Image: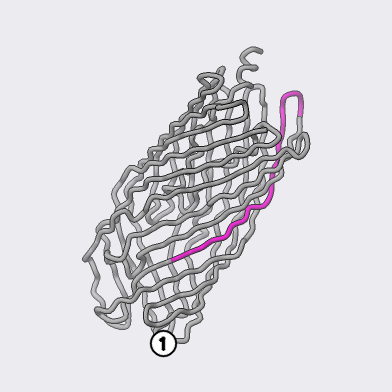
Amino acid sequence: MRVLKTLAQTTVLGCAVSMIPAAAFAGGWSTEGIADYDLLFADGKFVFETQATYADRNVDFKNAKTKQNTAFPVADDTNNSSANDIAPNIAVFSNSVKIGLLENLDLFARINQPYLIREQPGFDWNGRFAIGETNADALGVDAMLSYKHELSKGNYIRVFGGLRSVTVDYEQLSKTLVAPTVERDTEINVDSDREYGYRIGAAFEKPEIALRAMVAYESGIDVKLDGALAIQGAGSYGASAKATLPQSIEAKVQTGIAPKWLASFGVKWTDWSVLNELAVDVDSPGGAIPTNVVRDLGYSDGWIVEAGIGHQLTEKLSLGSSVTWDKGIGGPYSDTYSLSLGGSYDFAKNVKFTLGGRAIYKTSGEGSYDIVKTGAVNSDVSTEYEYDSSWNFAVSSKLRVAF
């Protein structure tokens, strides 16, 4: 009984630095890891949490080769075949709150950045006619209710569900070759209204041994984007696009394995293959202005697998570590393998500060940017590229206050 009591009092981090979004480096556009809404399970009537992550990324394109089919013959371009630091460093923030409404009924709410794109190979490489920059930001707002029921003495089942919503701003910059030596800046800039999906899940909990097993499903979200396509010297024209942000299924289990020790394991599947292209329709007057611009993405489904262990050193200090494999989905998003280390310290009875770091090994890969423009004058451009393996790093901090 003493061992069980000690396990129940465990306050380790669990999968300590899974708070650092592995998907900031691979797995597509998502910044969310496995069960990144763990605050839902926190003790306390009112719990607030704020988190910030900074990621140092390191990806260089090489051996780029561009092919263009235009109104005039264009030879394959292998000049300026490299682009350095195509994935600039990023910062990701989130704020969450859990409120106990009734004895067994809780509310969880969050504001975060669930998707983020920064691909910036620039306008000096030969691939600038396909992509010079891709930038996208998303603002997510989630709200869930959670109901906890005691099945038998010390054994609980929890069901939860609610809405998730997002707005998306998307920008795609490139050059357009309008004559053999004449280039024009081209910009697609579209954004969406707030669109909605849902999350549902269930968990089994046995606090006596710090056991929790959870499974959850997140629906896809259809977004409609409106804005403009602008070509230097040719004006700006209304543009619209549709996209489906992927659904996902995740499962995570954690349990006490010895006094003041806790282990966890999680897996997440994300349906990135649903996002195979981004098609932009343009209110074109005809001529050289396309009526449709299609970017072929060709993503494959993503997987994240993570295992972690945590240990409570003192009543105030806990340490944890995790290892993660994140399957690449294609293009600049290759497989990554990472090691995370972190610790949390209780400054006061209800104030916990967590700091963690992650070292990420990103595997080598290859991909292509493929753009097809349809209109009175059809054209397409394809840039194939390669990149070497590299090391990436991240640091994340989290402050949790409970009442």
Residue type at tag 1: Gly
Tell me the quarter of the image containing the N terminus. top right
Q: What type of secondary structure mainly makes up the magenta span?
A: strand
Magenta span:
151-171
Residue placed furthest toward the top: 2
Residue placed furthest toward the right: 102
- The residue lying at 59 percent from left, 49 percent from top is 111
The reply to whether the magenta stretch includes residue 8 is: no
Residue placed furthest toward the left: 79
Tell me the quarter of the image containing the C terminus. top right
- The residue lying at 53 percent from left, 42 percent from top is 51
Q: Which residue is mark 1?
A: 287
Secondary structure at numbered mark 1:
loop
Place of residue 315 in the rendered image (x, y in percent of width and height, measured from the top left): 56, 20
* Image side of residue 150 versus residue 374, left or right: right
Place of residue 145 in the rendered image (x, y in percent of width and height, measured from the top left): 71, 44
- The residue lying at 47 percent from left, 43 percent from top is 53
Nearer the observer, 191 or 255: 191
Give the vertical position of 2 relative to 83 (above or below).
above
